[in-house]
Each structure stands twice: as C-alpha cells, then as structure tokens.
Amino acid sequence: MFRLDSRLKVFLHREAVDGRKSINGLALLVEQGLGLDPFAPAAYVFSNRRRDRIKILLWDRNGSGCSSSDWKPIASNGPRGQISSN
C-alpha cells in the first residue's frame, strides 16, 4: 500500500504495455522509452491494449513497487457519447 502525495508527479504511458512486464521491464521502459528516471519520486502508470488493467510503478524510500488493478466498467443509463444539458 502506498499513499499519493499532492507533490507526487504522475506520468501516464499512452501506448499499450504487455501486462506480463515485471518491475524491471517497466523501469527500463520509463528510462529508455520516456527518458525519465524510474527512481525519481513519481508514479508511472501503464495500461494494457484493452485499457481494462493498469500497472503503477512507484519508487519510495524503501524501494520500488509495482501495483496492478482491474478496471470494472461502470453501468450507464444513457447512450454513450452524449451529454445531457438539463
């Protein structure tokens, strides 16, 4: 478990990433693909092709950590893509 601080920078990797990548693979992607320091006080967020799973790479004082999560679709009562202007 980690806490998000208001000073923490969050970087979102836009391209899909293979969900089997380990902490080392994600750190390498941050360093070589994004040109950023994987050991900086920041959170790096990655998602899969379907955008229903994420992985977060985070470095803190105790070392690096990786967390993954499933996204559950939210039920909608109206048509997609339309905004009500009541």
Image (cartoon, rainbow, N blue to C red):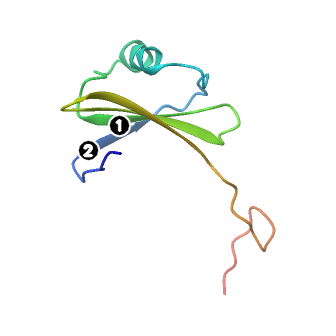
| Dot label at residue 73 | none
Residue at the image point whose x is 29% and y is 41% from the top: 9
Q: Is residue 65 above or below residue 27?
A: below
Residue at the image point whose x is 32% and y is 22% from the top: 36
Q: Is residue 12 above or below residue 7?
A: above
* Residue ID for mark 2: 8
Is 53 on the left-hand or right-hand side of 28?
Answer: right
Q: Nearer the viewer, residue 22 or 10?
A: 22
In the rendered image, residue 69, in percent from the top left (x then y), is placed at: 55, 43
Q: Quadrant of residue 66?
A: top left
The amino acid beneath tag 1 is: Ala
In the rendered image, residue 16, in percent from the top left (x then y), is placed at: 61, 28
In the rendered image, residue 56, in percent from the top left (x then y), is placed at: 44, 36
Circle nearer the N terminus (1, 2): 2
Q: Quadrant of residue 48?
A: top right
Q: Nearer the viewer, residue 62 or 76?
A: 62
Is 13 on the left-hand or right-hand side of 5?
Answer: right
Say if mark 1 contacts mark 2, CB within 8 Å.
Answer: yes
